[in-house]
Amino acid sequence: MKLQTKLPLIPERQNQIDYASRILLLGSCFVENIGEKLEYFKFQNNYNPFGNLFHPLAIENLIANAVNEKQYSESDIFQHNEQWHCFDAHSELNASSKNQLLTNLNAQIESTSQELKKATHIVFTLGTAWVYRLIEDDLIVANCHKVPQKKFAKELLSVDEIEEILLSIIALIRNVNNSVSIIFTVSPIRHIKDGFVENTRSKAHLVAAIHQVIEPRIRHFYFPSFEIMMDELRDYRFYNEDMIHPNKTAVNYIWEKFIAVWVSEEARKTMEDVDVIQRGLLHRPFAPNSAAHLKFLKNLEIKQKALSSKFPHLIF
């Protein structure tokens, strides 16, 4: 008896991720789920330097500013509720002083610029096609920062508009890094604050637009995070209590699928070694000064040195 439909996934053979890869992840908060996994297993990765960016236009803006090495100035920021904000970035970059915010923004732009040039893989997780336009400045923002809603007009990006944005993102990246593999995915997180039908329309626009630009022969790929959540994990037990975000079990399941497609077999063996060390470091002994525990720590140190000698960037 079959109790679950399975998506047919074919491992990528030519551009797999290994421990020499440099991975940049940009997009919605699902990026953090995958980024934290990559971090745990000690891959070389960086994610969301401007915080969560939910829609394609916000990502394009970051990429363009990084490629063009933009320098943020006072004209790009504003004060609201005793904090300094930038409409290009998530609220996690907010600061109590304008100088601190400008320092944060420019440091992250410089970091992103370098990561774009060095990356072997860039993963984009698109969350929504709904955007908010600041009426006064006719500016589509990445984050509203709790500015009164009456100051914004809500709009749905069309499939054609999203396709044009994605093509622009690809062109900007290829201008500084022509060999990188670009992986698009749609976030499995449900944006039901927009409305149930509106969320479906939004996801449909994203999926349709992405499939207009993917082309494996030139290293543009699609990974079906959204479809795995909707079709293989179609049960509320795979959601957090908010019934919106995938829970730990779901994230682990999608992560395992991602590994199967994108991570090389040799790297998966190294991941097992890293996991042994990580779990060992998290272990809290009942008798920390016992001979058995001291021996355990010595063996753990030997394993760490062996891995670090093979992969110098691995720091535990």
Image (cartoon, rainbow, N blue to C red):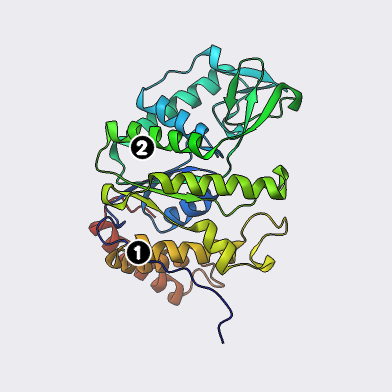
Q: Residue furthest bottom?
A: 1
Q: Considering depth in this image, is 28 or 313 the residue closer to the camera?
A: 28
Is label 1 or label 2 in front? 2
Q: Which residue is mark 2?
A: 170
Asked which secondary structure carries label 1, the reply is: helix
Vertical position of residue 128 compared to residue 144: above or below: below
Determine the residue positioned at 61% across, 59% down. 246
Q: Considering depth in this image, is 123 or 162 the residue closer to the camera?
A: 162
Q: Considering depth in this image, is 274 or 238 the residue closer to the camera?
A: 238
Assign the N terminus to one quadrant of the image: bottom right
For mark 1, does the 10 Å Cα neighbourhood hold few (<14), some (14 to 19), or many (20 or more) residues? some
Vertical position of residue 182 compared to residue 55: above or below: below
- Residue 184: give x, y in percent of width and height: 43, 48
Quarter where residue 70 is shown: top left
Vertical position of residue 82 compared to residue 215: above or below: above
Give me the C-alpha separation between circle 1 and circle 2.
43 Å
Disc sitting over residue 201 in the figure? none
Mark 1 or mark 2: which comes first in sequence? 2
- Residue 212: give x, y in percent of width and height: 41, 45
Quarter where residue 3 is shown: bottom right
Assign the C terminus to one quadrant of the image: bottom left
Q: Are the residues flagged by discs 1 and 2 in contact, CB closer than 8 Å? A: no
Q: Amino acid at mark 1?
A: Glu
Give the left or right position of residue 265, taking residue 211 as reference.
left
> Taking the image as drawn, is residue 29 in sight?
no
- Residue 80: give x, y in percent of width and height: 70, 21
Q: Amino acid at mark 2?
A: Ile
Give the left or right position of residue 83, taking residue 103 as reference.
right
Determine the residue positioned at 53% across, 70% down. 285
Determine the residue positioned at 63% across, 25% down. 133
> Taking the image as drawn, is residue 315 in sight?
yes
Q: Which residue is mark 1?
A: 301
